[in-house]
Amino acid sequence: MEDRSSARKPASTGIKSWAKDDRPREKLMMKGPAALSDAELLAILIQHGHKEKTAIDLAKEVLEQSGRDWNQLGRRTIAELTQIKGIGEAKAIAIAAALEIGRRRQSARLHQRPVIRCGQDAASILQPLLADERAEVFCVMLLNQGHRVLSHEIISRGGISGTVVDIRQIIKRALEMESSALILCHNHPSGQLEPSEADRAITRKIISAAQLFDIRVLDHLIVSVEGYYSMAEHGLL
């Protein structure tokens, strides 16, 4: 007959059983966030695993299904995240919120009204905002006479393959903001950065309309998770 009182229980494999400097939260407190791996940082957001996996195991699965790429993870919807066993709506929302905070931090210097000297300066602000969009989005950056950023605004949203751009809306906002120059920008969800003939045609139309009000179009950027393409740098303006 089995002696239940002396039977050994399996050792716990949960995070609480780990050494303190191996637990994500304690490790962050002792060593700082830079010391944590991607999975450890994500595990802090996830907080709890389930009976089969720890929070870190679950974080590794989330990252694996996104190709271990934060950009791909940033493009996943709440519905897609909750398809992973152990990721409920609350966990998915926490992940989405943290990634949005990262985007906003990247673009925070916009509020300092930086000077735009080249396409890369504008792309460093606009790419984080548009690259993760799953549909095509058209944006305009408004600049003053010294090429300092006044604001940037999304003008239109479309589908996977394109969006309709209202040129009147662009000129209206430029006049309201007393902008002297514009930078146009839209994303390509496909990742392809080369401008299409439609992209070139709308650029020419906007340049012509802006010239009537003595407003210069400095560039038209195409952005994706792969990088950016500057029409000005390629001699297309």
Image (tube, rainbow, N blue to C red):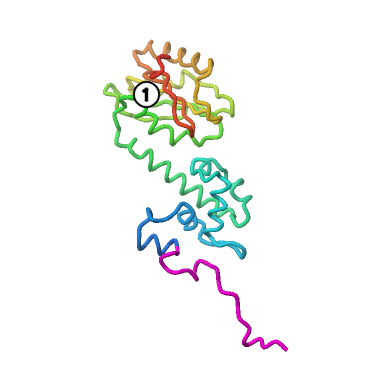
Residue 171 against residue 55 in the figure, above or below: above
How many dots with numbers?
Answer: 1
Residue 150: % across, % down? 33, 29
Residue 101: % across, % down? 43, 46
Q: Residue at x 62, y 63 (%)?
A: 52
Query: Could you tell whether 128 is left or right of 189 in the image?
Result: left
Amino acid type at circle 1 is: Glu
Q: Residues within 10 Å of mark 1 (few under 14, many from 20)?
A: few
Q: Residue at x 30, y 32 (%)?
A: 114
Residue 197: % across, % down? 53, 15
The residue that label 1 is drawn on is 176
Q: Residue at x 55, y 44 (%)?
A: 67
Badge 1 element: helix
Query: Could you tell whether 236 is left or right of 4 in the image?
Result: left
Query: What quarter of the picture does the C terminus occupy?
Result: top left
Residue 134 against residue 92 in the figure, above or below: above
Residue 231: % across, % down? 42, 19
Q: Residue at x 39, y 23 (%)?
A: 183
Query: What quarter of the picture does the N terminus occupy?
Result: bottom right
Report the magenta stretch's main SS.
loop
Tell me where residue 20 sits by quadrant: bottom left
Magenta span contains residue 6: yes
Magenta highlight range: 1-23
Q: Name the outermost residue toward the right.
A: 1
Q: Name the outermost residue toward the left.
A: 146
Query: Could you tell whether 49 is left or right of 28 in the image?
Result: right
Q: 206 or 177: nearer the eye?
A: 206
Magenta span contains residue 87: no
